[in-house]
Image: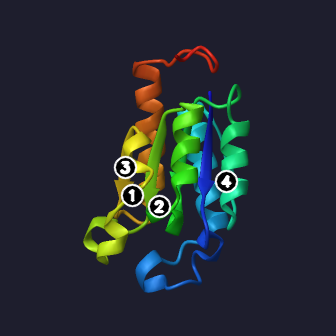
Amino acid sequence: MRILVLHGPNLNLLGVREPEVYGTVTLEALDRALVARGEALGVAVDTFQSNHEGALVDRLQEALGTHRGVLLNPGGLTHTSVVLRDAVSAVALPTVEVHLTHIDAREPFRRVSRVAPVCVARVAGFGAHGYLLALEGLVARLRAAPFPPAGTIG
């Protein structure tokens, strides 16, 4: 089983950008932790970060037929991107929305997620540890109720 982790805009600056808000863990350290947790769970984890909406959509579409699920932190695109929302819906891979901060407790504009309605779950507010929780939850969900192979849904 392969899981794709997509990190959106500005997440390449983890550990540097507003560490009092987003923490001190770097993206590289987070990715290493995800791969290690995946190995412990018996799954392969592939990670990808881009500051470009289209690159995230392309990588998500490339996951069809190769990955069973997705962890997605859309960053600021959470609140604005109909395109990313439509891509998540179109590929129909079980997707968990992940956020380092508790977005529902932040500024009003951050409380609206365009992608949440097409995700199977959201994990937010646990910092970098939230990614590991999301990975464990997604893997458990996939093992409990396997989805049909890509291309056979609807």
Disc 1 residue type (three-letter): Ser
Regarding residue 134, the answer to whether it shows in the image is yes
The label number, if any, that marks residue 122 in the structure image? 3
Disc 3 residue type (three-letter): Arg
Q: Nearer the viewer, residue 133 or 93?
A: 93
* Measured Cα–Cα span from mark 3 to mark 2: 12 Å
Count neighbours of disc 1 (C-alpha within 10 A) and say few if under 14, some if 14 to 19, many if 20 or more.
many
Q: Nearer the viewer, mark 3 or mark 4?
A: 4
Q: Could you tell me if the residues under marks 3 and 1 are in contact, i.e. CB atoms within 8 Å?
A: yes
x and y, in percent, of residue 113 in the image = 39, 58
- Tell me which numbered mark, 3 or 4, is placed earlier along the sequence: 4
Which residue bears the numbered disc 2?
Answer: 78
Q: Is residue 27 above or below residue 133?
A: below
Q: Nearer the viewer, residue 147 or 141?
A: 147
Q: Could you tell me if the residues under marks 3 and 4 are in contact, i.e. CB atoms within 8 Å?
A: no
Which residue bears the numbered disc 1?
Answer: 113
Which residue bears the numbered disc 4?
Answer: 56
Count neighbours of disc 3 (C-alpha within 10 A) and say few if under 14, some if 14 to 19, many if 20 or more.
some
Disc 2 residue type (three-letter): Thr
Disc 4 residue type (three-letter): Leu
* Measured Cα–Cα span from mark 3 to mark 4: 18 Å
- Tell me which numbered mark, 4 or 2, is placed earlier along the sequence: 4
- Tell me which numbered mark, 3 or 1, is placed earlier along the sequence: 1
Q: Could you tell me if the residues under marks 2 and 1 are in contact, i.e. CB atoms within 8 Å?
A: yes
- Tell me which numbered mark, 3 or 2, is placed earlier along the sequence: 2
Instruction: Tell me the element at label 2.
Output: helix
Q: Residue furthest front?
A: 82
- Tell me which numbered mark, 4 or 1, is placed earlier along the sequence: 4
x and y, in percent, of residue 142 in the image = 47, 26
